[in-house]
Amino acid sequence: MYYSEHKRYVKNLTVHHIWEVLRDSPGVRTRPRGLADVQSTNRLEADCLTTEFGALSNIVAAARDGNGKLITMNASGKSGVAPPKVLKRVVIIGGGATGTGIARDAAARGYDVVLIDRGELGNGTSGNFHGILHSGARYAVNDVAVAAECFQENQLLRHIVPSAITDTGGLFVALSDEEVIHSRVLISACANAGIPVQVLTAEQAFQVEPGLSKSLKMAFTVPDGFIDGAELLRLNRLAAVEAKVPATFLTDHIVVGLERTGDAVSSVSVRDTRTGTVEHINCDYVVNASGVWAGEIADMAGLRLDMVYDKGAMLIFDQQYNRAVLNRCRPENDGDLLASHAGQSIMGTTSRIITDPDDCSPTQEEIDILMHEGAAMVPALRDAKILFAYAGVRPLLKENGKRHAPNTRSMSRSFRVLDHTEQGIGNFISIVGGKVTLYRRMAEAVVDLLDVKSSR
Ligand SMILES: Cc1cc2nc3c(=O)[nH]c(=O)nc-3n(C[C@H](O)[C@H](O)[C@H](O)COP(=O)(O)OP(=O)(O)OC[C@H]3O[C@@H](n4cnc5c(N)ncnc54)[C@H](O)[C@@H]3O)c2cc1C
């Protein structure tokens, strides 16, 4: 959680709640400084609770445990250990949603951040995705935990990065009897995940989305939105460079090596892709947030990380055919989603395993499928003009060396934070998987782990 957003977000946490959490932390013996001062209001405002880490940290309360170690609590209500007092340098590899989110959070907590990307920010999947701020409903049947996480982040991001989000709403549409049956399963799964839905009559659905197919049998709303990837990355970068210890962003620099000293990576070698100059950046920690390229970076440190490259194609049409994000109500398949933004509609997506993440153009077969499935939901798409077709690659981790199924839709859309201490490198963390919708939570998990490591 970022300091600048505390005021808005922590209002729902009472002082009592914070103390309850801290009191249960092992060995906590003193009431956090500052808590007494605001108790009379019974409401927490971050400004009232400046800890000894001050505005640099994401911490809203702190207490010492029996050994004198600081136990802290951030604005999400999570307790943890204190961040470092001595400036520690974190080199983040990857300038997508994940890497820039980590840069923002780490800079806010007082780390000396250097982020490196081989191209511009958004050069990878975060610049080539569908743009949907997921409500989580799509995942509710297969993975209720991910669905609930998406919904929580969906709500939170509207406050944290408002200029990147358009509240389009979302609509699930059932076009056959099987899809009506699936709707019922999905609605009940959404209830389990805490995702609000509202069932519409056909008449109401056509009022909201006049372009829908007349085969419509059932529709219900979900709180999907549109998230502008470029604006999100800009906001994350801005927050990171405006932190008290400003982050450094080295774009157009490719990581070509990781130098090890004992059980740590001591420096990161980068080549300026415009001049060819190579430099070595000393580091205390390295975060591998390089998406589908995470295996290549891990390899430079002598580690193995098996990624599955799952390509998805999308089409952009020259007109806006819908307002809400339209979701086909069936088990996930090719061509289930039609988003819209700034006078255009974006149809997606597919799922094809590829062998090279740098070679991911959409094929004619994928374009045909997307046209066909799009027209099933919105018939006018049959004659729509495609402005361009593009593709992105999902950074999925192959678990335990398992062979992946031909279709990766059964693979989790959750994320994994990998602490490589067990493989012999104590200051190297990889983060893989996830969604743009989950980027803040992913960043928080990584920086929480950095805090734990740096307080040892
Ligand atoms: C087709 C498709 C549609 C999707 N739609 C959605 C959606 O609608 N909503 C949603 O929430 N999620 C969506 N996702 C998922 C989401 O886009 C990804 O999970 C997310 O963008 C991954 O972000 P990242 O920062 O982890 O990786 P990336 O954005 O790929 O960032 C990794 C960065 O690492 C850099 N890098 C790699 N190697 C090096 C190196 N050697 N040196 C320096 N830099 C390097 C790359 O240039 C890249 O910029 C979609 C994914 C796909 C494939």
Image: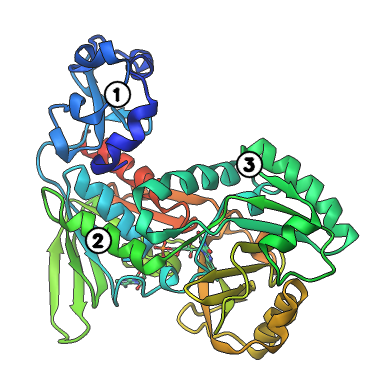
Q: Mark 2 points at which residue?
A: 237
Question: Looking at the picture, which amino acid does disc 3 mark?
Answer: Pro
Label 2's element? helix
Percent x, y of residue 96: 36, 65
- At horizontal 30% and vertical 13% (from top left) the residue drawn is 27
Q: Give the side of residue 235 with respect to residue 225, left or right.
A: left
Mark 1 sits near ligand 1, with its Cβ under 8 Å away: no
Label 1's element? loop
Q: How far apart are marks 3 and 2 (CA)?
A: 32 Å
Q: Quadrant of residue 232?
A: bottom left
Answer few, some or many: residues within 10 Å of disc 1's Cα (few below 14, many 20 plus, some between 14 and 19). many
- At horizontal 22% and vertical 10% (from top left) the residue drawn is 30
Q: Mark 1 points at which residue?
A: 44
Mark 2 sits near ligand 1, with its Cβ under 8 Å away: no
Q: How far apart are marks 1 and 3 (CA)?
A: 28 Å
Can residue 410 be seen here?
Answer: no
> Which quarter is ligand 1 in?
bottom left
Question: Looking at the picture, which amino acid does disc 2 mark?
Answer: Arg
Q: Give the side of residue 451 with respect to residue 320, left or right.
A: left
- At horizontal 35% and vertical 59% (from top left) the residue drawn is 163
Q: Quadrant of residue 251?
A: bottom left
Question: Looking at the picture, which amino acid does disc 1 mark?
Answer: Leu
Percent x, y of residue 173: 75, 60
- Front of the two marks 2 and 1: 1
Mark 3 sits near ligand 1, with its Cβ under 8 Å away: no
Q: Name the residue under label 3.
A: 196
Answer few, some or many: residues within 10 Å of disc 3's Cα (few below 14, many 20 plus, some between 14 and 19). some
Q: How far apart are marks 2 and 1 (CA)?
A: 28 Å
Q: Give the side of residue 85 with respect to residue 204, left or right.
A: left
Percent x, y of residue 161: 35, 53
Quadrant in which the C terminus is drawn: top left
Q: Who comes first in sequence, dot 2 or dot 1?
A: 1
